[in-house]
Image (cartoon, helix red, strand yellow):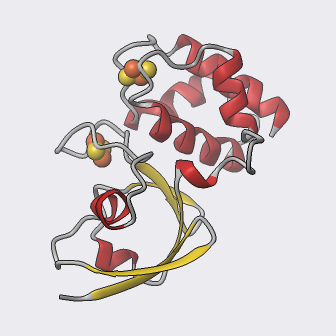
Amino acid sequence: MPTVSMTVNGKQVSGEVEGRTLLVQFLRENLHMTGTHVGCDTSQCGACVVHVNGDSMKSCTLLAVQADGTDVTTIEGLADGDTLHPMQEAFRDNHGLQCGFCTPGMVMSAVDLVKKNPKASEHEIREWLEGNICRCTGYHNIVKSIQQAQQTM
Ligand code: FES
Ligand code: FES
């Protein structure tokens, strides 16, 4: 079986995987980092979004072997100890979540958006979130959360 090595949340990790192992499976099953969720098997829901070399990516669309040598950040790596990332604070302040299933992917996508387009309009925020499905919130408070984080990030 191939061995893959990568940096996850600042730490060097490695493990044996099958050729078909997805990055999200490697994170959840090999590293036991279950903050990254799996909400579909069709690459539609966005619950699995992480950052790979600084870009948000659906970790169910990438094989673990394709992520060999990359720098991965997951939802577990966003807070600084007990201090939440400004995007996490904003989701908490604005009730940007209900059941929370979509939230890790939503937050990781949102952080990438604000980094790339700090002044994104409401329309651009909604467009960016097209790859992230939330079945609870109706998106309104998620958009408000991201607008707050635009001021605080
Ligand atoms: S698990 Fe649904 S898009 Fe990755
Ligand atoms: S908060 Fe439940 S799916 Fe988004």
Where does residue 21 sit, x and y in percent of width and height?
21, 69
Where does residue 86 sit, x and y in percent of width and height?
75, 36
Compared with 148, 11 (above or below) is below
Q: Quadrant of residue 68?
A: bottom left
Give the residue at x 25% y 64%.
Answer: 22
Report the number of numbered marks: 0
Q: Quadrant of the N terminus?
A: bottom left
Where does residue 66 sit, x and y in percent of width and height?
33, 77
Q: In which quarter of the image is residue 107?
A: top right
Question: In which of the image's four quarters is ligand 1 placed?
Answer: top left
Nearer the observer, 17 or 107? 17
> Quick check: 18 left or right of 121?
left
Q: In which quarter of the image is residue 47?
A: top left
Q: Quadrant of the C terminus?
A: top right
Compared with 153, 63 (above or below) is below
Give the residue at x 25% y 46%.
Answer: 43
